[in-house]
């Protein structure tokens, strides 16, 4: 079984968890490449897939690391640098693990790798997934396409950018989420009140205009669950759709509904609460120049279109079902 590991030591628990994985990989003769910068990931992936003939790629890190890996893999395959995409396994080890947990994994990274190496490749479970494909114009006016799992624009993206700037830790994520909710309910602290304002934009779902012009936040996702166990989507998507949320209400009104909205328990039946599976979603924001994809920040040219669709299919190995 040709297994390779790509690891981000700066993710979450860092070396505490990675040391055990490194020792096990050395004993098993598994190639592990530790990358310290995004510029190293592309070369590392090509080395694993072409030189080492890796068929199963284990990714140590959080949602952001996983996003970078699939983004680069799709790009390298499109330009012919690699022939086929490997099977991908999320080992965890990072801070934000929405995709990791959605795939059913709850074990520690070392437990996952041991389970994988003891299982014949024919017996590994498979889960096909098409990530989001985000097409936009960057700050320099160049067209870009990125791939990932959870897209945010507006209030949530601003809060994620804030806690990421202080260090992507679970504690920071909880702190700024709580402060954001507090600002919505009580108007305090002022630093977070400024982050949860509505913005002007034109939106289309499946190329039909949405009856909103000042959304608070926009979420697109291929996963049913998000961070902190939130599962805000009210309807089940088809295999060729993704989830989309666009709420045009003040942060104060949304804050009081959070217990219901987080589980999709109740979504007010008005055009101000768009919550549907879609084939495509498009937004042209007037002032927002930043969106978030799996915890990673991307900057866009002002007043240009951001289009979200589904990208090419990738195979993941989810958690084993209990017998």
Image (cartoon, rainbow, N blue to C red):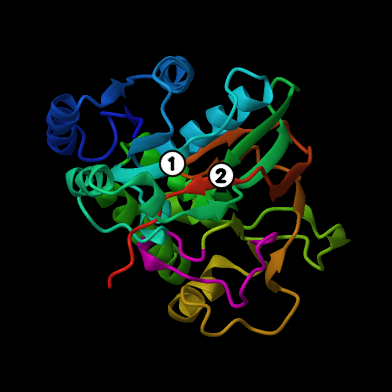
Quarter of the image where the C terminus is located: bottom left
- Judging by the rendered image, the residue that carries numbered circle 1 is 88
Left or right of 205? Residue 4 is left
Q: Residues within 10 Å of mark 1 (few under 14, many from 20)?
A: many
x, y (%) of residue 55? 43, 33
Q: Residue at x 67, y 41 (%)?
A: 134
Q: Position of residue 17 (x, y in %)?
A: 16, 39
What span is colored magenta in the figure? 224-242
Residue at 81% in and 65% down: 210
- The N terminus sits in image quarter: top left
Q: Are marks 2 and 1 in contact (CB under 8 Å)?
A: yes
Residue 126 makes an appearance in the image: yes
> Which corner quadrant of the image does residue 277 belong to?
bottom right
Q: Disc 2 and disc 1: Cα gap in Å?
A: 8 Å
Decide: few, some or many residues near mark 2? Use Cα within 10 Å; few <14, some 14-19, many ≥20: some
> Which element type, helix, strand or loop, lies under badge 2?
strand
Residue 280 lies in quadrant: bottom right
Residue where numbered disc 2 is placed? 314
């Amino acid at each position: 079984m040709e297994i390779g590991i790509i690891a981000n030591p700066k993710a979450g628990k860092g070396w505490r968890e990675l040391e055990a994985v490194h020792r096990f990989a050395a004993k098993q003769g598994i190639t592990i490449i530790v990358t310290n910068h995004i510029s190293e990931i592309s070369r590392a992936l090509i080395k694993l897939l072409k030189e080492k003939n890796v068929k199963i790629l284990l990714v140590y890190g959080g949602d952001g690391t996983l996003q970078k890996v699939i983004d680069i893999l799709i790009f390298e395959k499109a330009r012919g640098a690699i022939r086929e995409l490997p099977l991908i396994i999320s080992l965890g080890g990072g801070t934000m693990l929405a995709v990791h947990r959605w795939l059913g994994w709850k074990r520690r990274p070392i437990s996952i790798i041991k389970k994988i190496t003891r299982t014949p490749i024919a017996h590994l479970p498979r889960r096909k997934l098409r990530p989001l494909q985000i097409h936009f114009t960057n700050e320099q006016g160049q067209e870009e396409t990125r791939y990932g799992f959870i897209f945010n624009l507006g209030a949530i993206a601003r809060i994620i950018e804030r806690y990421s700037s202080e260090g992507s830790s679970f504690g920071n994520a909880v702190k700024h989420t709580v402060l954001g909710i507090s600002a919505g309910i009580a108007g305090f602290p002022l630093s977070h009140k400024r982050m949860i304002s509505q913005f002007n934009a034109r939106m289309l779902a499946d190329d039909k205009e949405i009856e909103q012009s000042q959304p608070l936040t926009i979420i697109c996702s291929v996963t049913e669950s998000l961070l902190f166990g939130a599962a805000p989507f009210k309807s089940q998507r088809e295999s060729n759709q993704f989830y989309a949320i666009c709420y045009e209400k003040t942060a104060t009104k949304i804050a009081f509904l959070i217990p219901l909205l987080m589980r999709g328990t109740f979504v007010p039946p008005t055009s101000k609460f768009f919550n549907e599976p879609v084939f495509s979603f498009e937004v042209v924001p007037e002032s927002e120049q930043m969106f978030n994809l799996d915890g990673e920040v991307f900057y866009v040219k002002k007043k240009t279109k951001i289009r979200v669709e589904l990208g090419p299919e990738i195979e993941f190995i989810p958690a084993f079902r209990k017998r």
